[in-house]
């Protein structure tokens, strides 16, 4: 809860009390212990009506390839979700890739989570707690801190919009986790109503769109959501988001050899990006992601593109006036890279 929500929920707890209580909890203090900063009556009211739940850390696995760390976390109903600690370029700063659901219903062909099906939405506290778990592994004395959060773990965040929005309020509240909203990105496979809701209720948070390919027929073959929400419908919602927030979106493309890596795919994406610029005055940041094979699946039909094919794709976009960013997707040896989260412990 945010301090304002806590103060509204408990008569006798002032906003000042609530700020101190929330601050104590999120600095990993125990609100049940006597605290000179918190009035006794306020502390007793909180202890009587609530508690601070937690997630069990099942495993914490470090990549041997890079400084990525994957956490497997068990919920109270014995489900397992995965969270990734991502090192940023500046030493001591980290981003946390959080899950928003147990499994996912959208079944994107190149994503391990999509093969699990949807088991349930995560609660607000379960989303926030993933960040708190990671933060506890950092050395504050050495200046280490959580600098950002990306909603790109297990699940489709905008299919759990209510709890994601509530988690965003806690993550950005100065008395709680206190992360700059501009350092948080919510990624979606393309739910137009959720994109619009995010724009209106969290206008400083950035939007990421997993576009797959800008060729509609090819997109539907790898992202079944295109049947319910075609490319043009999602595009219109992204335009509205940019106009309302003034923020440029991130468009992510996971390149699959022989599927969406052709020059025609690049040109279609370039045309859409130029159209977006004309419609909004904003330039989408296009992130090219190498495909990461789904662990322990010999039947995986997809392959990572080779360097020449990726270069041709990026060059075609560049010649069309669209610049790309190659995302480093780390932790592939521990199943922590983009598209690999599957919580096999669950």
Image (cartoon, helix red, strand yellow):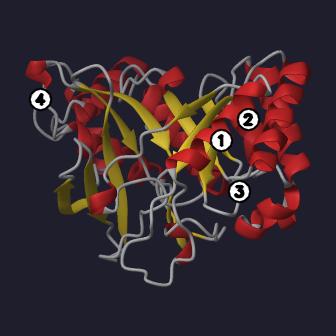
Q: Which of the two discs, 1 and 4, labels the residue nearer the N terminus?
A: 4
Q: Is residue 69 left or right of residue 105?
A: left
Which residue in the protein does label 1 denote? 312
Look at 49% across and 59% down and name the residue there.
339
Q: Secondary structure at mark 3?
A: loop
Which residue in the protein does label 2 denote? 316
Extreme residue toward the bottom, this view: 299
Q: In front: 221, or 113?
A: 221
Cβ atoms at labels 3 and 4 below 8 Å apart: no
Question: For the residues carrying marks 3 and 4, which lies nearer the camera in this image?
Answer: 3
The answer to whether residue 177 is visible is: yes
Q: Secondary structure at mark 4?
A: loop
The Cα–Cα distance between marks 3 and 4, rounded to whole angstroms, is: 42 Å
Look at 83% across and 15% down and name the residue there.
281
Which residue in the protein does label 4 denote? 139
Q: Which of the two discs, 2 and 3, labels the residue nearer the N terminus?
A: 3
Q: Is residue 89 above or below residue 122?
A: above
Q: In front: 100, or 320?
A: 320
Which residue in the protein does label 3 denote? 260
Cβ atoms at labels 1 and 3 below 8 Å apart: no
Question: Which quadrant would the C terminus be assigned to in this image?
Answer: bottom left
The Cα–Cα distance between marks 2 and 3, rounded to whole angstroms, is: 13 Å
The Cα–Cα distance between marks 2 and 1, rounded to whole angstroms, is: 6 Å
The Cα–Cα distance between marks 1 and 4, rounded to whole angstroms, is: 43 Å
Look at 24% across and 37% down and name the residue there.
135
Q: Secondary structure at mark 1?
A: helix
């Amino acid at each position: 809860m945010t301090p304002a929500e806590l103060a509204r929920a408990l008569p006798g707890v002032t906003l000042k009390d609530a700020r101190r209580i929330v601050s104590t909890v999120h600095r990993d203090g125990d609100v049940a212990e006597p605290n000179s900063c918190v009035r006794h009556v306020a502390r007793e009211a909180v202890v009587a009506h609530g508690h601070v739940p937690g997630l069990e850390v099942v495993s914490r696995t470090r990549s041997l390839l890079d400084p990525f760390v994957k956490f497997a976390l068990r919920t109270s109903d014995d489900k397992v979700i995965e969270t990734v600690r991502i090192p940023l370029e500046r030493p001591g700063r980290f981003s946390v890739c959080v899950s928003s659901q147990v499994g996912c219903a959208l079944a994107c062909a190149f994503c391990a989570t999509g093969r699990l099906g949807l088991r349930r939405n995560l609660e607000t506290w379960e989303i926030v707690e993933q960040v708190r778990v990671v933060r506890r592994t950092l050395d504050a004395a050495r200046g280490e801190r959580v600098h950002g959060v990306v909603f790109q773990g297990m699940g489709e965040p905008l299919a759990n919009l209510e709890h994601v929005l509530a988690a965003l309020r806690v993550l950005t509240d100065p008395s709680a986790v206190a992360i700059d909203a501009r350092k948080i990105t919510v990624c979606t496979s393309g739910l137009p109503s959720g994109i619009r809701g995010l724009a209106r209720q969290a206008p400083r948070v950035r939007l990421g769109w997993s576009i797959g390919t800008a060729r509609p027929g090819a997109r539907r073959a790898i992202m079944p959501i295109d049947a319910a929400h075609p490319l043009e419908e999602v595009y219109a919602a992204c335009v509205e988001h940019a106009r309302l927030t003034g923020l440029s979106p991130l468009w992510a493309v996971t390149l699959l050899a022989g599927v969406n890596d052709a020059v025609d795919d690049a040109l279609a994406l370039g045309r859409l990006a130029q159209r977006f610029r004309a419609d909004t005055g904003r330039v989408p940041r296009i992130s090219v992601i190498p495909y990461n094979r789904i662990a322990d699946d010999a039947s995986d039909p997809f392959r990572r593109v080779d360097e020449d094919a990726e270069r041709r794709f990026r060059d075609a976009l560049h010649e069309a006036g669209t610049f790309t960013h190659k995302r480093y997707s780390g932790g592939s040896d521990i199943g922590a890279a983009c598209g690999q989260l599957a919580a096999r412990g669950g």
